[in-house]
Structure formats: structure tokens, C-alpha cells
Amino acid sequence: MEALEAIMTRRSIRRFTAEPVAAEDVETVLRAAQAAPSAGNQQPWRFIVLTERDTLAAAAQTSPYARMLADAAVGIVVCGDTVDLKHALMWQQDCSAAVQNALLATHALGLGAVWLGYYPKMERVGPLKQRLDIPDDVEPLAVIAIGHPAEAKEPVDRYDPSFVHYERW
């Protein structure tokens, strides 16, 4: 799949089949995530890969919007390590770029995924950190639920020229 096709056709998938995701595909997604740009090349991202049913089910309970994790084959928790950063306030942007790369790679592999937002919603962050033993200096930005799609969604063209300004507002 070409890059522009992946960007234009990617959709959030929230229903998955029971088919497992190959370990090689998970590694490809992680490699794509780590190919993202970061401020000052600080690469603050850290990842927790969830594949055990009990762990996925527990993670699904940490947010009212994470129920699909219980049925996903894989969950990838994208965290920012906030220790000794050159650009301390940029880790959220860096990790968001990693999430987007992971979503596009997942789609290009023929898998489905959805971005589940956590940070800065501390009512979600706290329970996730507790269940996954995440250190104090590491913040979970998002969880990506991944699996073989059990739903199909047509591409949507969201381009709106009224959102675009040239030279000045």
C-alpha cells in the first residue's frame, strides 16, 4: 500500500476477529512507531505490548472508551519517558507522531486499529499505570487496540478548505 493511500483510507476499527496477529507484524508496527520524528531526536517513546487476554481485559477496564481492548489481539501502550528530556514539554507530540505511524503501519499490513487516548485524562492514566506497573516518570499517552478487522469502513474525505488559511488568519 502506498503512503498516501494508507493515509487517505485508514479508519478507526473497534471490532476485531479472534485471529491472532503475527509477532512479525507487531514488530513492524513498533519499528514504524519508532521511525517517527521527535523534538531534538529525544525519542521519549516507550511501549508496552499487551497480548495476554487477562492483561487486555484489565486494560479495557481503565477507560470507558477502551472496551474493544478486551477483544483485540494486541494492545500497544505508547508511553513517554519524562526523565532527562532536552525538550520536556514535547514528549506528547513525539509520542503522538509515533502513534500515527503505528496506525498507518497497522493499516498498511491489512490490520485494524484504534487510538485510545489517555494522557492528560488522569482518571484513565492512573488506573492504567497501576494495572501495568508503569513507573512514576513514565506517562501513558495512548493505547492502540490492534487486530484483524471484524468491520469494514469506507474511506472518508475530511478535507475542508474553510479550515485552511494562507499567509495570515
Image: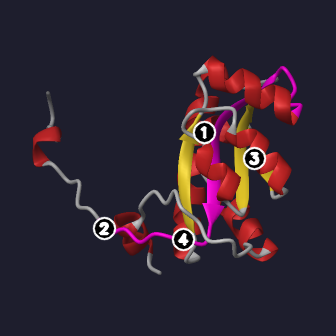
Within the image, what quadrant is residue 72 found in?
A: bottom right
Q: Which mark is residue 144?
A: none
- N-term mark: 4 or 1: 1
Q: Amino acid at mark 2?
A: Pro
Label 3: which residue?
57
Instruction: Say if the magenta span includes residue 140.
Output: yes
Q: Amino acid at mark 1?
A: Asp
Q: Secondary structure at mark 4?
A: loop
Q: Secondary structure at mark 3?
A: helix
Q: Is residue 107 visible?
A: yes
Q: Amino acid at mark 4?
A: Pro
Please determine whether, in this image, residue 130 is positioned above or below residue 16.
above
Q: Position of residue 128 (x, y in %)?
A: 75, 31
Residue that appears at 57% across and 33% down:
64
Give the class, few, some or many, for how many residues have Cα within 10 Å of label 4's Cα (few <14, many ≥20). many
Within the image, what quadrant is residue 168 found in?
A: top left
- Separation (CA) of disc 3 from disc 1: 28 Å
Q: Position of residue 8 (x, y in %)?
A: 34, 66
Residue that appears at 61% across and 36% down:
39
Residue that appears at 52% across and 56% down:
14
- N-term mark: 3 or 2: 3
Label 1: which residue?
94
Q: Which mark is residue 149?
A: 4
Give the class, few, some or many, for how many residues have Cα within 10 Å of label 1's Cα (few <14, many ≥20). many
Give the class, few, some or many, for how many residues have Cα within 10 Å of label 2's Cα (few <14, many ≥20). few
Q: Is residue 26 left or right of residue 142?
A: right
Q: Is residue 43 visible?
A: no
Please determine whether, in this image, residue 157 is positioned above or below residue 54.
below
Please determine whether, in this image, residue 85 is positioned above or below residue 28.
above
- Separation (CA) of disc 4 from disc 3: 18 Å
